[in-house]
Image (cartoon, rainbow, N blue to C red):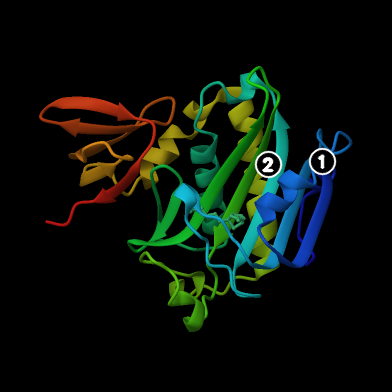
Amino acid sequence: MRLPLSESVSSRLGSLEVLHEIDSTSEYLKRTRTQNNANSIRVCAAERQSSGRGRRGRRWVSPYGANLYLSLAVQLGKAALRSGGLSLAAAIAVLRALQDCEIRGVGVKWPNDIFYQGRKIAGILLDLSGESSGPFYVVLGIGINLKMPESAAREIDQPWADISQTGVKVDRNHLAGTILEALVQAIDTFGEKGLEAFIPEWNQFDMLSGRAVELHYDEEPMITGIARGIDASGALLIEENGVTRHFNAGEVSVRVA
Ligand code: BTN
């Protein structure tokens, strides 16, 4: 895999590994972290993941050679993470990259899913480790469906889409390079300005805003209301009986009338 990367991004990469098969590209970056590589950006992509991880303990179906499975690890200071919402900024970066590849009709669903025509086309997983005073070792894992084989599709437990359904032909290496460029840029912007810099785009591409939603969070009673975008920390706003509440976690879905 040769990725088309700008000089400024490639000069910051400590390593770029493309593996045939691994349990999970994010797990790989976490367990191979050493003092020597802690300060540089590390990237790992794989043709197949045998134990691809999704959010909330889900599995990420990762058949061979079909899609993009890519993780990026970077060390960030506590200050860079203070405003929260890095994974939302990463979702905007993925959205920008898809648009750069001429893919239209994509939107974001809180907290960091990318949807195409109401079905999930890409997901982001954020892993943080480190002392509470920082610095933090951040691993961002990105999974994008390009051409999901039928046999693998049967294993997916939620509505899904892939890039082949958009009618746009995208070279996988080109997409991977575009995503890395967008991610590195988004991490830098997030470090300087926080989530605020991404909120206008979030509002533009928010597929929940103004819709009746329900939010499930562990054993808590289900919350229902109208989605009203996000706040400055990335929390989801839900208006219920004229009162707007802020939610930092949970699984949100559009209510079926
Ligand atoms: C989600 O549930 O939406 C998050 C999916 C994240 C999948 C990617 S694929 C590359 C990286 N490695 C993993 O095991 N998971 C992430």
Question: Mark 2 highlights which residue?
Answer: 184
Is ligand 1 within 8 Å of the beta carbon of the residue shown at mark 2? no
Where in the figure is residue 238, as x and y percent of width and height? 24, 34
Residue 205 or residue 1, whichever sits in front: 1
Question: Ligand 1 lies in which image quarter?
Answer: bottom right
The quadrant holding residue 12 is: top right
Q: What is the x, y in percent for residue 82?
A: 56, 21
Give, as a three-letter code, the residue at label 1. Answer: Arg
- Residue drawn 53% across the image and 67% down it: 61
Residues at badges 1 and 2 in contact (C-beta under 8 Å)? yes
Q: Is residue 157 left or right of residue 36?
A: left
x and y, in percent, of residue 116 in the image: 40, 62
Q: Nearer the viewer, residue 72 or 156?
A: 156
* Label 1 CA crowd tier, 10 Å (few <14, some 14–19, many 20+): few
Q: Earlier in the sequence, mark 1 or mark 2?
A: 1
Q: Is residue 159 visible?
A: yes
Examine the rendered structure and indicate whether residue 99 appears above or below residue 13: below
Secondary element under disc 1, as helix, strand or loop, is loop
Indicate left or right for 158 with 212 as reference: right
Q: Quadrant of the N terminus?
A: bottom right
Residue drawn at 25 percent across, 26 percent down: 245
The residue most toward the bottom is 150
Amino acid tagged 2: Val
* Residue placed most toward the observer, 162 or 253: 253
- Element on which disc 2 rests: helix
Asked whether the viewer can see residue 211, the reply is no
Instruction: For the C terminus, give its image quadrant.
Output: bottom left
Task: Please name the residue that numbered disc 1 is placed on.
Answer: 12
Q: Position of residue 99 (x, y in %)?
A: 52, 56
